């Protein structure tokens, strides 16, 4: 079994857990607090970011998209119609574009700020970045959610899955991101019915179950968080 | 010939030009001002980011790392010892980690701020984000350069090329980034002799020549910018 250094409320880590889960591969999960800059962790990843996968031979593979490519090259290629990636280079480019949309663009415009202010700051020591939430940062992130939800709603209205007819990394990246925002009660699903139908389908998959069991101390999820029918 | 929508002072765009250049493939270059949010450009890439490659059949491929993967899948695999990527999945992960270090981490901690404040703001209309440079942002970015240069210097001291014995995407991503900072005179090379030797080797490659000819109106490059021996 491989080991994943992760944090339960980071979308990039959830994405990797979903991908391994889809392939039926269990991971040993180690929760890492990157702000503590633990020496052994920095030795694996000098950028001090999550996730980090300890792959075969304990070689660290750093970053969600790098791990996803590694997983595809070492497992995905053998999965035929269960592969989370396409064969065709252009279809692969579209999957990468969408995964990057959620894990980079949505992350930097929305998710990172809400997670930092609402989840991480209350648990970080003052000297490591903790403190009271910055309400201006929260307001700005909330103002940006609409655009990302509208785009997701539009995508799910034009395609069966986000990047085409099969579930791919694009769906897992998007669902990982939305699951964090949903935990925090930041999504008004009534406005995005097509996105809700799609999310409900992803949420019902066995790979999603562990994420629905995640809890952060002192921060109860929104009441429908683990409901498959919401 | 494929078309690249780019800006000459964005590291991610320079990286893609270098990669095509290494494979001897010419590109039609179209300079795009993403802040103008041109309608036809947004239709190709709703994220309004550069670079965008118009691939075969005028299908847009969005983002430097996505373009690099596409280039590898459609051209690189045939290049044998001239391939800019490795065969082994773990070696590929290391190349991706390093390319991402420069194009994401260095970009968000250093390059983006210096380019925005010193290059783009003076040419952007006020309503689109133009204005006088933010000296605090410039100071913060300059304070971060050291760490990235030290890391580059360390990498070049332990390996022939950044990710091992052959030139790869990692070198092109790093050199593209440093070439932008060097144009702006932001690098004190005397402090980083190993990085300088390595950069001088990359700079001497034919693929680099077009970048050394780039000029931004009203912003003369540092005197040694185009010198192969600096």
Image (cartoon, coloured by chain):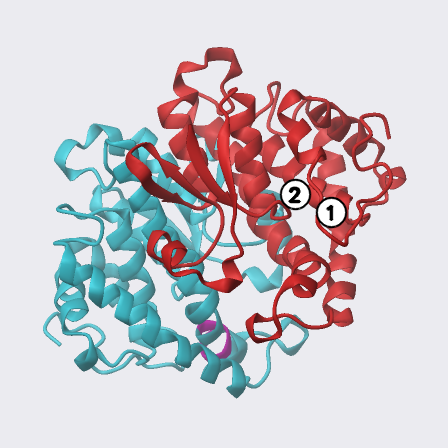
Chain colours: A cyan, B red
Q: Quadrant of the C terminus of chain A?
A: bottom left
Residue B83 among magenta residues: no
Residue A116 among magenta residues: yes
Q: Position of residue B98 (x, y in %)?
A: 57, 38
Q: For the residues tagged 2 and 1, is the chain the same?
A: yes
Q: Position of residue A28 (x, y in %)?
A: 36, 48
Q: Which residue is mark 1?
A: B181
Horizontal side of B48 relative to A222 (left or right) equals right
Q: Position of residue B152 (x, y in %)?
A: 71, 38
Q: Which circle marks residue B73 in the picture? A: none
Magenta: main secondary structure equals: helix
Packing grade of label 1 (10 A; few <14, some 14-19, many >=20) is many
Of residue B62 and residue B5, the one placed in the foreground of this image is: B5
Taking the spot 16% from the left edge, 53% from the top edge, the residue there is A161
- The answer to whether residue B114 is visible is yes
Of residue B179 and residue B146, the one placed in the foreground of this image is: B179
Q: Which circle marks residue B177 in the picture? A: 2
The part of the chain drawn in magenta is A115-119
Of residue B46 and residue B43, the one placed in the foreground of this image is: B43
Horizontal side of A135 relative to B194 (left or right) equals left
Query: What chain is tagged by disc 2?
Result: B
Q: Quadrant of the N terminus of chain A?
A: top left
Dots 2, 1 in contact, CB < 8 A: yes
Query: What chain is tagged by disc 1?
Result: B
Horizontal side of B7 relative to A139 (left or right) equals right
At mark 2, the secondary structure is: helix
Give the spatial CA distance, label 2 vs label 1: 7 Å
Where is B55 relative to B32, above or below? above
- The answer to whether residue A179 is visible is no
At mark 1, the secondary structure is: helix
């Amino acid at each position: 079994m491989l080991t994943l250094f992760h944090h339960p409320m980071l979308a990039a880590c959830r994405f990797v857990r979903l991908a391994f889960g889809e392939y039926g591969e269990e991971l040993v999960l180690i929760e890492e607090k990157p702000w503590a800059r633990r020496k052994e962790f920095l030795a694996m990843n000098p950028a001090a970011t999550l996730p980090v996968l300890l792959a075969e031979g304990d070689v660290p593979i750093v970053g969600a998209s790098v791990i996803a490519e590694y997983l595809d090259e070492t497992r995905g290629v053998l999965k035929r119609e269960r592969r989370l990636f396409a064969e065709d280079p252009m279809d692969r480019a579209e999957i990468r574009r969408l995964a990057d949309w959620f894990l980079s663009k949505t992350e930097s415009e929305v998710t990172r700020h809400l997670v930092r202010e609402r989840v991480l700051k209350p648990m970080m020591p003052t000297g490591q970045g903790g403190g009271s939430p910055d309400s201006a940062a929260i307001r700005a992130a909330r103002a940006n959610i609409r655009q990302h939800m509208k785009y997701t709603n539009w995508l799910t209205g034009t395609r069966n899955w986000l990047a085409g007819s099969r579930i791919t990394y694009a769906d897992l990246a998007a669902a990982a991101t939305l699951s964090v925002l949903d935990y925090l009660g930041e999504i008004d699903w009534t406005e995005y019915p097509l996105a809700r139908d799609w999310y409900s389908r992803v949420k019902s998959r066995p790979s999603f179950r562990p994420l629905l069991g995640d809890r952060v101390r002192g921060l109860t999820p929104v009441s429908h968080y683990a409901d498959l029918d919401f």
